[in-house]
Image (cartoon, rainbow, N blue to C red):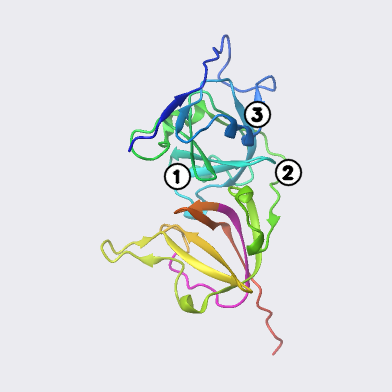
């Protein structure tokens, strides 16, 4: 079913240049929740966001999208581009011009993108138009903060933020498995879920089938995982970023 379409009141941008400046109307990412309802809406107000790229297609852990976050929240931006990491590096600070983009939500997850032509809340921004909405800022030494979380502490407020979860062990039923399963119909690896325990609590990890290390065996010793907390198939799931898999094994001297 096509999403319900709402519209924000139009604010005309007179005499503006194509580049954002410090005079622009900057909003927090969390403020987007004031606009989105249960469907999808076109943003026509003069809204700019500023945040850090905390997820992209490096190692193909995310498929044709980036996640931008500030101190308040994060938003997934759908982009029809295969080499996003060459243009928007992890930890890059960028400005997002929202006017002309479509805003949607799935559960506690926000999306920005192009007008939806199908069933999904937004479509991907064409490569030719990415430069109209996303602007990289000069490099600085600030980097996003990873929130240290136990599995039991993960909450909706952590969706699309950087999190690190320590002391994880693969559940017994998945020992010996690779990160992703093979689709028997196509012979390709498909997006898969893996499960790690921390005491009595279980963390779901989602791995894209095109991920560079999809065919690697999963470590069976204690590990730390860092990435973004995503919303996948109606539940929270960690999506590893920048191949952040820290082996906790201590090699004993010979």
Near-viewer residue (238 or 84): 238
Name the secondary structure under disc 1: loop
Q: What residue did someone put label 2 on? A: 142
Near-viewer residue (136 or 42): 42
12 vs 134: above or below: above
Residue 249, which numbered label?
none
Q: What residue did someone put label 1 on? A: 64
| Image mark count | 3
* Magenta run includes residue 218: yes
Circle 2 Cα neighbour tier, 10 Å, few/some/many (<14 / 14–19 / ≥20): few
In the rendered structure, the answer to whether residue 185 lies left or right of residue 155 reads left
- Nearest to viewer (mark 1 / mark 3): 3
Residue 27, which numbered label?
3
Q: Which circle's residue, 2 or 1, is located before the other in the chain? A: 1
Mark 3 to mark 2 CA distance (whole Å)? 20 Å
**Residue in view at x 48 percent, y 73 percent:** 217
């Amino acid at each position: 079913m096509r999403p319900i379409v709402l519209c924000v009141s139009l604010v005309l941008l007179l005499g503006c240049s194509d580049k954002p400046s410090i005079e622009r109307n900057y909003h927090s990412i969390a403020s987007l929740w004031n606009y989105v309802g249960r469907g999808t809406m076109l943003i026509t107000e003069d809204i700019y966001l500023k945040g850090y790229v905390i997820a992209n297609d490096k190692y193909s852990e995310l498929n044709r999208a980036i996640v931008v976050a500030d101190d308040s929240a994060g938003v997934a931006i759908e982009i029809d581009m295969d080499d996003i990491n060459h243009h928007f590096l992890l930890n890059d600070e960028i400005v997002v011009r929202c006017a002309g983009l479509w805003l949607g939500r799935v559960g506690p997850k926000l999306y920005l993108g192009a007008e939806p032509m199908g069933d999904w809340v937004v479509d991907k921004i064409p490569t030719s138009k990415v430069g109209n909405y996303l602007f990289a800022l000069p490099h600085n030494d600030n980097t996003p903060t990873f929130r240290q979380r136990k599995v039991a502490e993960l909450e909706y407020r952590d969706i699309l933020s950087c999190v690190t979860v320590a002391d994880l062990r693969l559940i017994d039923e998945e020992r010996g498995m690779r990160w992703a399963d093979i689709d028997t119909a196509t012979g390709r690896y498909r997006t898969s879920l893996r499960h790690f325990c921390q005491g009595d609590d279980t963390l779901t990890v989602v791995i894209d089938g095109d991920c560079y290390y999809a065919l690697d065996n999963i470590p069976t010793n204690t590990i730390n995982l860092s990435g973004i907390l995503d919303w996948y198939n109606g539940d929270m799931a960690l999506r590893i970023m920048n191949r952040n898999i820290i082996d906790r094994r201590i090699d004993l001297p010979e």
